[in-house]
Image (spheres, grey):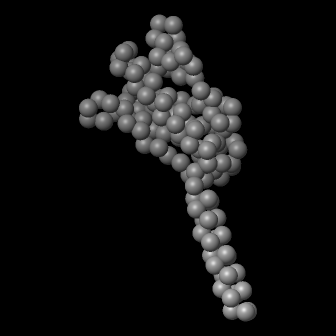
């Protein structure tokens, strides 16, 4: 009887351990939303570039009546505006400052032109140290 209880306990502990590892390594819904928003914003910046021959100075330029690439700029899951910075004429970065402030995963993406002239994304993420 004791061996059956031990075996049952061992199996339960093993299953719970595996489940907790899977949950801990799984990105949060906030992280996934931020990643999706950043990808969509990067696409909008790419459209802006194609139509205007240069990067927007700020994300708000995507809403400009003259350009009107998008109808709205999303906020990150922590209700903070996404950040944008031009690194050079062919590279820009978009990131979620809310992910830094809330100690969740950091979410950012660097977009660079490839050989075809299209912006491609290199998603950067990791655990926040703040």
For the point 68% across and 88% down, the residue is 4
Q: Nearer the viewer, residue 104 or 26?
A: 26
Is residue 87 something one can see in this rendering?
no
Q: Nearer the viewer, residue 12 or 24?
A: 12
Q: Nearer the viewer, residue 80 or 92?
A: 80
Q: Is residue 59 above or below residue 108?
A: above
Q: Nearer the viewer, residue 97 or 43?
A: 43
Indicate left or right for 103 with 25 as reference: right
For the point 60% across and 69% down, the residue is 18
Q: Residue 8: image x %, image y %? A: 67, 82
Most extreme residue toward the front is: 1
> How many numbered badges does the structure rendering display?
0
Q: Quadrant of the N terminus?
A: bottom right
Q: Residue 43: image x %, image y %? A: 43, 28
Is residue 123 something one can see in this rendering?
yes
Q: Is residue 128 above or below residue 85?
A: below
Q: Residue 59: image x %, image y %? A: 53, 22
Q: Residue 6: image x %, image y %? A: 70, 87
Most extreme residue toward the top is: 66
The image quadrant that residue 122 belongs to is top left
For the point 52% across and 11% down, the residue is 64
For the point 41% across and 32% down, the residue is 91
């Amino acid at each position: 009887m004791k061996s059956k209880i031990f075996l049952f306990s061992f199996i339960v502990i093993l299953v719970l351990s595996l489940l907790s590892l899977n949950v801990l390594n799984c990105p949060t819904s906030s992280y996934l939303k931020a990643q999706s928003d950043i990808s969509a914003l990067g696409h909008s910046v790419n459209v802006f570039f194609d139509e205007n021959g240069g990067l927007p100075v700020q994300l708000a330029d995507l809403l400009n009546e003259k350009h009107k690439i998008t109808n709205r700029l999303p906020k990150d899951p922590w209700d903070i505006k996404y950040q944008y910075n031009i690194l050079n004429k062919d590279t820009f970065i978009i990131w979620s400052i809310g992910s830094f402030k809330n100690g969740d995963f950091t979410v950012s993406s660097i977009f660079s032109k490839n050989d075809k002239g299209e912006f491609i994304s290199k998603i950067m993420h990791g655990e926040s140290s703040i």
